[in-house]
Image (spheres, rainbow, N blue to C red):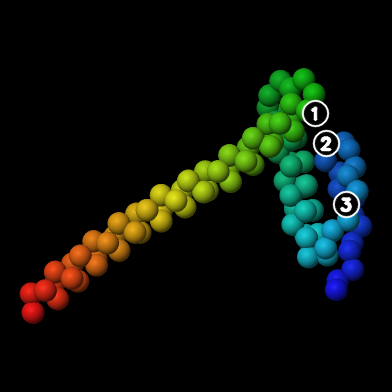
Amino acid sequence: MQERLKIKLSIADRVYPLTIDPSQEEGLRKAAKNIEQLAKKFEQNYAVRDKQDVLAMCALQFASKIEQGGIDQSEGTKKAKERLRALDDLVNSKLSLK
């Protein structure tokens, strides 16, 4: 069993100590970096009252990307199923003729 790793991530001027599996480290560090970059962008471009507002806007941004990805994937799956049904109907109609 892999040993757990203790790391510290800094987000919005706060340090968060975490105990994680080593395989999670890269993803968590990238996520923290992305949050920091987006927070800085929001602070520069919008009138925000405090870090809580910035973090809420970051959370909304990331959550909406995940949700939109699910919606896009669902629509793509629906279109693929429709095309497969049409192809199946075409094959079945050709087989019935013989």
The residue that disc 1 covers is 51
Residue drawn at the location 14% of the way across and 76% of the way down: 95
The three-letter code of the residue at mark 1 reads Lys
Q: Is residue 63 left or right of residue 40?
A: left
Residue 81 higher or lower than 92, as above or below = above
- Residue 6 lies in what quarter of the image? bottom right
Q: Quadrant of the N terminus?
A: bottom right
* Nearer to me, 85 or 14: 85
Q: Quadrant of the C terminus?
A: bottom left
Residue drawn at the location 18% of the way across and 71% of the way down: 92
The three-letter code of the residue at mark 2 reads Ala
Mark 1–mark 2 distance (CA, rounded to whole Å): 7 Å
**Marks 3 and 2 close (CB-CB < 8 Å):** no
**Marks 1 and 2 close (CB-CB < 8 Å):** yes
**Marks 3 and 1 close (CB-CB < 8 Å):** no
The residue that disc 3 covers is 18
- Residue 22 lies in what quarter of the image? bottom right
Q: Residues within 10 Å of mark 3 (few under 14, many from 20)?
A: some
Secondary structure type for disc 3: strand
Among numbered discs 1 and 2, the one appearing first in the sequence: 2
* Nearer to me, 81 or 16: 81
Secondary structure type for disc 2: loop
Residue drawn at the location 80% of the way across and 24% of the way down: 50
| Of marks 3 and 2, the one in the foreground | 3
- Residue 53 coordinates in the image, percent (x, y): 74, 26
Mark 3–mark 2 distance (CA, rounded to whole Å): 16 Å
Among numbered discs 3 and 2, the one appearing first in the sequence: 2
Q: Is residue 21 visible?
A: yes
The residue that disc 2 covers is 12
